[in-house]
Image (spheres, rainbow, N blue to C red):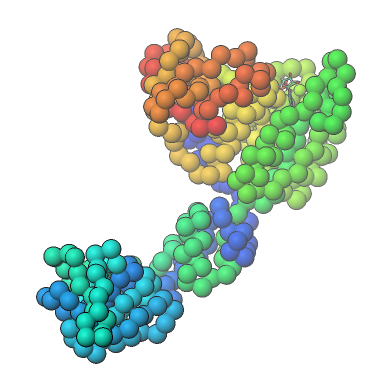
């Protein structure tokens, strides 16, 4: 059976199907930029004042006669007296003939012979201080944001500052989420004694929404004909399907066989892990990908979080290490995903629970610690939940 580490490697080789779209900037977060963006001017575009204070031309004197006030948004001023100063505000262009900016906290303003003067409380004045020099961040025509960048909020700010109100990005299209099982009823229904409410699909849909992906949900009974037809219909419009339930060894676990009939190749089915052993992942020649999660709510949560979310977000490895109290001995042949709770900044303890059907105790889990088979280490890497 495949180890989780091997499963992560296989996932990296499955291309994430994305669509090329030209979107308003406000909708580009999380997309992958498909074009290099060029600086349309120098950044900053002028010698920019970085502090409220004064701009001076002579750094070797201690008192300067004021010539006026320059605000951000006004055209560049010019110092006429070499021993004079302009009062200036952050973001304004440095007046011509000035070589340094002194900040307001270091200044003393006074009047002499009916004129306004300013002196510095600071002994050392450096040429160039608090001046954000034109073109010092990047020069006009250079690449300011590279093709292939996964767009975060700070990248959106850069695109805005070079005048792009729309961008070409690759992003995930809509995903269809399927719950399966004759025992499941919808959230609004009152279950009979032998039934339970379906929770996996809404959990996955909420998490997808959190990363900016739209989804639709369908419920499927344990009926191979209906399952086949529904999946076929969805596959005619979407590239990624997420299924929960029906992939284990039960008599009505039809999913793997149906996916094969639909032309999908299993990249893996079964991972040497607890929980979530029967996880099925496969793709088809046309690039469509299906993740079929074992139905136990915690198995779905764990497999969806650590495999699916890291796959679509191109995360290569799990997260830092933490020292964990209360660890049991490692399992002999299975890697163990253990729910942990933070006790202090760098420490965590194992959360007690009743297995992979127990959403109730797992509500307190902050992260999943990865205890590898046969590894007695009590310092483990983890995935935040
Ligand atoms: P299965 O993988 O289909 O054998 O299901 C394993 C267990 O998970 C069963 O107890 C199911 O009732 C439960 N289960 C399956 N799908 C869901 C779901 N969508 N929401 C909550 N529990 C589920
Ligand atoms: Mg089932």
Q: Residue at x 62, y 65 (%)?
A: 24
Give the quadrant of the N terminus.
top right
Q: Looking at the picture, how far across and down is residue 337, in whole percent?
A: 52, 22
Q: Which quadrant holds residue 183? A: top right
Left or right, 348 with respect to 21, comes to left
Q: Where in the image, quadrant-wise, is ligand 1 located?
A: top right
Which quadrant of the structure image shows residue 193? top right
Query: Against 256, is 85 above or below?
Result: below
Task: Please provide percent x and percent y for residue 135.
Answer: 32, 73
Residue 258, visible in the rendered structure: no
Residue depicted at 67% across the width and 32% down the height = 292
Q: Position of residue 260 (x, y in %)?
A: 71, 33
Q: Is 254 placed left or right of 266 in the picture?
A: right
Is the C terminus in the top left, top right, bottom left or bottom right quadrant?
top right
The quadrant holding residue 28 is: bottom right
Say whether residue 196 is visible. yes
Q: Name the residue rendered at 56%, 18% in the picture.
A: 274
Side of 119 relative to 231 (left or right):
left
- Residue placed most toward the observer, 302 or 5: 302
């Amino acid at each position: 059976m495949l180890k989780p580490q091997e499963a992560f490697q296989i996932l990296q080789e499955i291309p994430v199907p994305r669509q090329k779209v030209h979107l308003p900037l406000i909708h580009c977060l999380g997309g992958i930029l498909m074009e290099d963006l060029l600086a349309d001017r120098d950044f900053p575009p002028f010698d920019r004042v970085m502090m409220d204070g004064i701009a001076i031309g002579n750094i070797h004197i201690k008192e300067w006669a004021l010539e006026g006030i320059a605000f951000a948004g006004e055209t560049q001023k010019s110092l006429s007296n070499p021993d004079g100063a302009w009062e200036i505000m952050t973001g304004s262009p440095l007046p011509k003939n000035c070589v340094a900016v002194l900040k307001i906290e270091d200044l003393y303003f006074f009047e002499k012979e009916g004129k306004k003067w300013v002196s510095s409380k600071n002994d050392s004045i450096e040429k160039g201080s608090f001046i954000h020099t034109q073109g010092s961040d990047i020069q006009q025509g250079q690449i300011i944001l590279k093709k292939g960048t996964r767009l975060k909020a700070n990248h959106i700010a850069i695109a805005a500052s070079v005048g792009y109100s729309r961008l070409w990005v690759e992003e995930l299209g809509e995903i269809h989420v399927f719950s399966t099982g004759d025992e499941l009823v919808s959230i609004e229904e009152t279950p009979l004694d032998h039934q339970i409410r379906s929770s996996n699909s809404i959990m996955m849909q909420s998490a997808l929404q959190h990363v900016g992906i739209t989804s639709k949900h369908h419920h499927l009974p344990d009926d191979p004909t209906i399952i086949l037809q529904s999946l076929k219909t969805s596959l005619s419009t979407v590239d990624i399907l997420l299924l929960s339930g029906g992939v284990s060894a039960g008599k009505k676990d039809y999913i793997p066989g149906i996916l094969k009939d639909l032309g999908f190749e299993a990249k893996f089915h079964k991972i040497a892990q607890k929980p979530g052993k029967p996880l099925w992942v496969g793709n088809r020649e046309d690039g469509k990908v299906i993740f079929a999660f074992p139905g136990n709510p915690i198995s779905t949560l764990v497999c969806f979080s650590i495999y699916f979310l890291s796959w679509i977000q191109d995360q290569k490895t799990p997260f830092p290490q933490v020292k964990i109290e209360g660890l049991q001995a490692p399992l002999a042949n299975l890697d163990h995903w253990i729910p942990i709770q933070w006790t202090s900044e760098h420490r965590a303890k194992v959360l007690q629970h009743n297995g992979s059907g127990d959403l109730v105790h797992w509500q307190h889990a902050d992260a999943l610690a990865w205890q590898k088979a046969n590894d007695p280490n009590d310092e483990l890497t983890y995935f935040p939940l």
